[in-house]
Amino acid sequence: MSTVLDVKIPRLQRDGFALKEIEFSVEAGYLTALLGVNGAGKTTLLSAISGLLPLPEGADVLIGGYSLREQEKEAKECMGFVFDDSPFDEGMSPLLTGQVYGPYYRNWDMEKYSSCLERFEVPKKRTIRKLSKGMKMKFQLAFALSHGATFLIMDEPAASLDPVFRDEFMEVLSEILEGEDCGILLSSQLVSELEAKADYTMMLHRGEQMFYDSTENILDKFLLVRGRYELFPYMKSRILGERLSEYTAEGLILNDGDPVRLDLECVRPTIEDLMYYIKQGVVKKGMV
């Protein structure tokens, strides 16, 4: 197992918003989810990792072992990207884009690129601006897969895709990871779909790194207790936060090995559950 991305950003200030104490890595053969509610800092972080934002003093991003600060060209050779807004010239066609920009990469494979466009049913000669948003995502993925990248960075790549292609898209990612020479960092609002696939999860909230660990380890740290609300006062010291509705009562507790002796159902939370309690301020940095 090799590390394809190392991120260390003590602080990055941008337009009144700051990323603080960000430090994590992405391993080859694994999918890492970058999650957080809107405004958490995901786009800022992705922009810094992809080189669209200058890194401040004391920060660095290593891609394939190359410093983005000091070896930008080599680092970007190792990186492929799929963004919500395509960075390519939209007046060009996918075919022309590959012919013009592909050779800038040492390991560019035009034959593989053409094959990927066909597999994803992307019109090769239609201008990019005339493609649907979903088609633009497929085009970017085809380009990213065709120059031997060892690290893929993806921002909402499947949000605009139909459910059928979303399943196919995740299958493609699984195929990429099976080779164990490429790692993926993927940011998405499709949290439940991503939870089932992500090996690791990095959670941001208000610019801070709340936790970074294997998805299984994160979820195993907590339990949801559900049942009659009148029983909750007996667990007051353990309940971090509550979510009530007309018919159910739910509380989040740490899974510390101490059994719940009351008549309450205990289940493992989902990542979406944790995002709710993070937003409520009851799950704190360092709990995981």
Image (tube, rainbow, N blue to C red):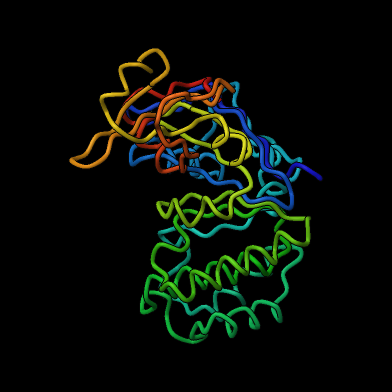
Give the number of marks.
Answer: 0
Q: Which residue is depicted at the point 78% across and 56% down?
A: 180
Left or right: where 151 falls relative to 11: right
Placement of 196 over or under 86, stated as above or below: above
Which residue is farthest top? 237
Which part of the image, by quadrant, shows the N terminus? top right
Q: Which residue is depicted at the point 72% across and 55% down?
A: 182
Which residue is farthest right? 1
The image position of residue 256, as x and y in percent, is 56, 21
Q: Which residue is depicted at the point 52% across and 50% down?
A: 195
Placement of 235 over or under 151, stated as above or below: above
Residue 110 placement: quadrant: bottom right
Task: Depth check: give the residue in front, 282 or 75.
Answer: 282
Placement of 286 over or under 212, stated as above or below: above
Left or right: where 45 falls relative to 279: right
Placement of 134 over or under 238, stated as above or below: below
Task: Depth check: give the residue in front, 118 or 242.
Answer: 242
Which part of the image, by quadrant, shows the C terminus? top right
Residue 274 placement: quadrant: top left
The image position of residue 31, as x and y in percent, is 63, 51
Q: Which residue is depicted at the point 58% across and 49% down?
A: 185
Task: Depth check: give the residue in front, 183 or 76.
Answer: 183
The image position of residue 243, as x and y in percent, is 28, 33
Left or right: where 230 falls relative to 119: left
The image position of residue 11, as x and y in percent, is 50, 22
